[in-house]
């Protein structure tokens, strides 16, 4: 219970602030700074969670004043004013000045900032507090801002730029292994328009389900995507029925189509959680008997028996007005043929009312329904030294690409096959369909994120292109899928192809619908036959460790043979070489399973392809007599520009290999250089005959063979010992415009790629 003394102190302090504002408005006192000290007892009223650590009163940055605009401003924000004064000086010297200030600490830690925003009422701190919360995609990230172990100084840097000035805010990292927390507050001379303020009636800590219901209903009633991208009228085999009072049950899907929601989430990393927690996630799976869910799941049971992410997904589904939800581990009973279920994911997600992406959750035991701390305080325009401070609106791309769900391999097809998606982030939800993208609590007068370049396609672009049947764009979308997929992780590497089998089936169906590609198109271990040369031209950002390669699952020429979580590049200008031809699939590959849907049968067979025969012009990468030199001898740097200087050995043929990133260069005498990118780091400790690794052995650069793919693209190959015409891929070379005649005079050969 609060003591009378502390209550009186709080009331007197609040009254003094109010009196100060009234006197300012009446012109009875000057508008110069007058700090109002925070009462000594106020911190105790907040409990340990919000009270800042004890500090010297001379450095108490939570003491407030009223600034010249009648807004409450703390002493810490005086440091930000100092940065703005610095900017004014620079712009007086040079109107076109561009640059950044030195960082300036303005609060000791986030708890102090939170205290200042919540109890001292500093308008600037409220703006900055919201900026930090809005950058947190996950609920865990938002909660960690106030963790006692994460309390570090907060600094600001003023950035002066022609595209717009801004403040870069940073909470220092507790150690070198943890990245700092950052946020950006744009600055403007013009007052931002606030046409809609969702906080006008107070805090908005809980999600707005009524708004979400309207958005979903509007799409289903008024958008073409409500029918255009639906795959079929079939329901999943089993659904989870929501009965009310927290009760649910697994039911056989009705024969007629029903509206259901699909959950897309991450189970989490078992190595990063206690064994009991992982066991609880695994225990959510539905057991079966003779292919039928056990009676315990077919009878009503409490949703609280499931992990928190599933519990909250069920509550959200119910609140939006739907009575069925599909959750993979619950609705695919143990003992079911998982391959068969995975191959129809394009139907499960394509036919759903919407997909609920648990973007706020790092694991299945994280809650989705947490207080949205960003909306705790009234959204109020804030001004310092003539500059209006604003909050950036986190883009949908940021939520898609930075959430834990985006790191999981299975969720890529869950997203790309879904006509409608709700991304449930830590501070708001986002809706995305082909005709509309909207965020909860939007239209707050925030500016869009500057310099935000869209890396990958929008969620529904794949479905939209599949619908149009544009084969060129369809190939572009598949290459986009590959880039997005290779960077992700899988709990089981053996699922490398299975986790995108639905995308492959949808791609094939779209490609052959016109009849033009029915006889020729073929799935080849993650690549497609009709544009095979281009699909072979993928590259890695830099060479990776060969130890965890997946060449036991996929051939060396497929991106699927790379280790998990590798960044690749697939989208570049490409014109196929006239001499390159795909000949046939070699080796033992099963025939198409006629009992299955053709698209599923094509995908099943494509996973098994290991060897193909191709034809193209070939030559050595390094000419006879070339001398090996160290990379340091020939690399030349001029600022950010990187090039080569071969003057050390004028008139000589040279080659070199970068030991850290896998680049290789070959320079013939009096001709331009060719630069290639190896897939793997060097392999040491074995002679060529015994070598069986994935990469190019150290010292084997002279044995590199080039296979022409396009006008400026070629594979780098290494002959398999004991086989004259069998090669495996070890790298790629693209963009060698200064050596257009590299393959002139070379004869075409037929070889096996393994």
Image: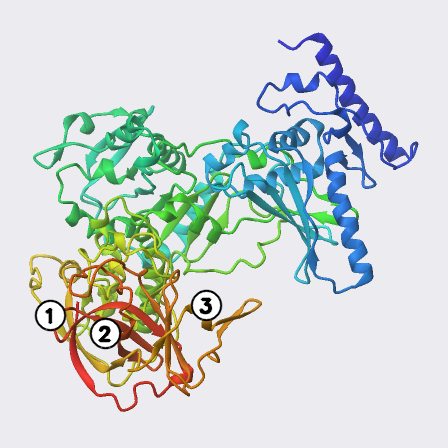
Left or right of 670: which side holds 524?
left
Judging by the rendered image, the residue that carries numbered circle 1 is 722
Of pointers 2 and 3, the one earlier in the residue sequence: 2
Q: Quadrant of residue 128?
A: top right
Image location (x, y in percent) of residue 694:
23, 60
The residue at 16%/49% (across/down) is: 339
Judging by the rendered image, the residue that carries numbered circle 2 is 530
**Quadrant of the image containing the N terminus:** top right
Left or right of 518: which side holds 386?
right
**Of residues 306 and 145, the one drawn nearer to the viewer in this rendering:** 145
Q: Which mark is residue 632?
A: 3
Of helix, strand and loop, which one carries label 3? Answer: helix
Mark 2 vs mark 3, foreground winner is 3
Q: Quadrant of residue 94?
A: bottom right
Asked if the residue under mark 1 is in contact with the one under mark 3, i.e. CB atoms within 8 Å, the reply is: no
Q: CA distance from mark 1 to mark 2?
A: 31 Å
Question: Looking at the image, which residue sits at the far bottom?
Answer: 745
Q: Is residue 628 above or below residue 358?
A: below
The residue at 12%/75% (across/down) is: 724
């Amino acid at each position: 219970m609060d003591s009378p003394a502390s209550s009186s102190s709080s009331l007197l302090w609040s009254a003094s602030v109010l009196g100060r504002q009234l006197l300012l408005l009446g012109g009875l006192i000057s508008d110069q700074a007058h700090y109002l000290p925070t009462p000594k007892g106020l911190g105790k009223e907040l409990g340990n969670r919000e009270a800042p650590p004890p500090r010297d009163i001379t450095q108490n940055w939570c003491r407030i004043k009223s600034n010249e605009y009648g807004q409450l401003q703390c002493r810490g924000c005086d440091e930000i004013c100092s940065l703005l004064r610095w900017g004014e000086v620079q712009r007086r010297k040079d109107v076109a000045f561009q640059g950044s200030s030195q960082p300036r600490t303005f609060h000791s830690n986030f708890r102090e900032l939170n205290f200042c925003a919540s109890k001292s009422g500093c308008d600037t701190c409220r703006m900055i507090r919201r900026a930090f919360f809005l950058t947190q995609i996950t609920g865990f990230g938002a909660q960690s801002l106030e963790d006692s172990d994460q309390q570090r100084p907060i600094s600001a840097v003023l950035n002066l730029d022609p595209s717009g000035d801004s403040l870069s805010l940073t909470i220092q990292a507790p150690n070198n292994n943890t990245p700092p927390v950052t946020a950006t507050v744009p600055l403007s001379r013009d007052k931002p328009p606030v046409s809609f303020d969702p906080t006008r009636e107070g805090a908005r800590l809980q999600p707005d389900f009524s708004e979400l219901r309207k958005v979903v209903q509007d799409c289903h009633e008024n958008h073409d995507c409500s029918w255009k991208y639906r795959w079929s009228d079939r329901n999943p085999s089993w659904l989870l029925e929501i009965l009310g009072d927290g009760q649910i049950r697994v039911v056989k899907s009705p024969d007629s189509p029903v509206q259901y929601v699909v959950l897309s989430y991450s189970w989490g990393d078992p190595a990063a959680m206690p064994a009991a927690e992982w066991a609880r996630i695994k225990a959510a799976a539905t057991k079966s008997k003779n292919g039928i869910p056990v009676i315990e799941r077919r009878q009503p049971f409490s949703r609280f028996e499931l992990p928190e992410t599933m519990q909250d997904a069920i509550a959200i589904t119910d609140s939006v007005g739907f009575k069925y939800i599909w959750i993979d581990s619950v609705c695919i009973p143990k003992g079911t043929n998982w391959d068969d279920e995975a191959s129809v994911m394009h139907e499960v997600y394509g036919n759903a009312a919407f997909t609920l992406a648990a973007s706020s959750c790092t694991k299945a035991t994280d809650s989705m329904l947490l207080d949205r701390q960003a909306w705790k305080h009234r959204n109020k325009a804030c001004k310092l030294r003539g500059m209006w401070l604003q909050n950036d609106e986190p883009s949908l791309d940021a939520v898609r690409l930075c959430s834990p769900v985006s790191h999981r391999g299975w969720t890529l097809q869950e997203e790309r096959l879904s006509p409608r998606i709700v991304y449930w982030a830590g501070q708001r939800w986002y809706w995305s369909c082909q005709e509309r993208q909207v965020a909860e609590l939007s239209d707050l007068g925030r500016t869009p994120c500057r310099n935000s370049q869209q890396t990958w396609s929008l969620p529904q672009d794949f479905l939209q292109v599949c619908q149009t049947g544009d084969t060129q764009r369809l190939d572009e979308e598949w290459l986009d899928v590959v880039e997005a997929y290779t960077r992700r992780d899988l709990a089981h590497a053996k699922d490398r192809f299975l986790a995108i089998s639905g995308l492959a089936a949808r791609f094939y169906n779209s490609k052959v619908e016109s009849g033009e590609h029915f006889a020729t198109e073929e799935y080849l271990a993650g690549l497609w036959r009709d544009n095979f040369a281009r699909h072979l031209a993928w590259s890695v950002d830099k060479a990776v460790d060969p130890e965890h390669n997946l060449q036991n699952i996929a051939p060396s020429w497929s991106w699927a043979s790379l280790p998990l979580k590798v960044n690749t590049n697939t989208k570049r200008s490409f014109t196929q070489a006239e001499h390159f031809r795909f000949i046939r699939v070699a080796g033992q590959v099963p025939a198409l399973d006629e009992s299955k849907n053709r698209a599923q049968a094509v995908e099943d067979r494509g996973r098994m392809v290991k060897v193909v025969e191709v034809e193209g012009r070939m030559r050595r990468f390094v000419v006879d007599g070339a001398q090996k030199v160290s990379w340091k001898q020939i690399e030349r740097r001029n600022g950010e520009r990187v090039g080569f200087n071969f003057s050390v050995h004028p008139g000589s043929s040279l080659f070199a290999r970068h030991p850290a990133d896998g680049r290789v260069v070959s320079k013939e005498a009096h001709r331009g250089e060719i630069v290639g990118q190896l897939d793997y780091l060097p392999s040491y400790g074995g002679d060529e005959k015994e070598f069986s690794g994935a990469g190019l052995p150290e010292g084997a650069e002279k044995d590199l063979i080039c296979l022409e793919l396009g006008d400026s693209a070629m594979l780098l190959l290494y002959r398999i010992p004991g086989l004259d015409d069998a090669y495996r891929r070890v790298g790629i070379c693209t963009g060698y415009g200064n050596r257009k005649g590299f393959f002139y005079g070379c004869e075409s050969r037929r070889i096996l790629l393994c």
